[in-house]
Amino acid sequence: MADREIIVPDSMKLIPERIGYAPAVKVGDTLYCSGQIGRTPELVVIEDPEQQFIAAWENMRDVLHAGGCTFEDVVDMTTYHVDLATHMDLYRTIKDRYFPRGLSAWTCIGVNALAHPALLLEIKCVAVQRR
């Protein structure tokens, strides 16, 4: 069995303690990132859609960085959206600020709800560290 490294950025130290999961797990050169949401390091969900989307991308960036990766290393991304039609234009604008276009597979899924009633977005990625 391959060695697993649990990845917990400093800004996410409360997640394993309070919620009980790892922000990411690294196996070899592959980083499996848990779904990232728009919340503060104190685990408070940001309710403003624009700020929530920005925080979700910044949280994903922090997880990738802690695992030795960048957005350019992402090979697969899945995003989950509550009220997809209402927020898609804003989401795409923010995504394009952070995420390089055309370098990753992407599945975009509309859902009825996420883990907290104020959540509108969750981003999950798999990255392969370049050598």
Image (spheres, rainbow, N blue to C red):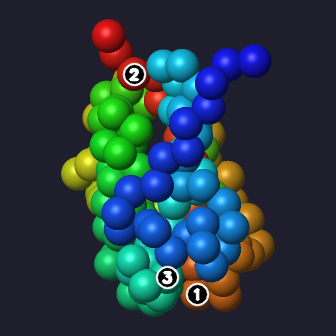
Which quarter of the picture shows residue 48?
A: bottom left
Give the residue drawn at x 48%, y 19%. 29
Q: Is residue 88 above or below residue 33?
A: below
Q: Is residue 74 visible?
A: yes
Q: Earlier in the sequence, mark 3 or mark 1?
A: 3
Which circle marks residue 92 in the picture? Answer: none
Q: Which residue in the structure is indicated by mark 2?
A: 129
Give the residue drawn at x 35%, y 63%. 10
Q: Helix, strand, or loop for circle 1? A: loop
Q: Earlier in the sequence, mark 1 or mark 2?
A: 1
Kindly identify the amino acid type of the residue bearing the numbered disc 2. Answer: Gln
Residue 125 in the image, given as x and y percentages of width and height: 53, 41
Residue 104 in the image, given as x and y percentages of width and height: 46, 27
Which circle marks residue 43 in the picture? Answer: 3
Q: Helix, strand, or loop for circle 3? A: loop
Kindly identify the amino acid type of the residue bearing the numbered disc 1. Answer: Ala
Q: Earlier in the sequence, mark 2 or mark 3?
A: 3
How many neighbours does mark 3 have within 10 angstroms: few (below 14), some (14-19), or many (20 or more)?
some
Q: Quadrant of the C terminus?
A: top left
Kindly identify the amino acid type of the residue bearing the numbered disc 3. Answer: Leu
Q: Nearer the viewer, mark 3 or mark 1?
A: 3
How many neighbours does mark 1 have within 10 angstroms: few (below 14), some (14-19), or many (20 or more)?
some
Q: Is residue 59 above or below residue 129?
A: below
Q: With 20 as the anchor, is 53 left or right in this view? A: left
Residue 63 in the image, given as x and y percentages of width and height: 41, 50
Q: CA distance from mark 1 to mark 2?
A: 33 Å
Q: Which residue in the structure is indicated by mark 1?
A: 118
How many neighbours does mark 2 have within 10 angstroms: few (below 14), some (14-19), or many (20 or more)?
some
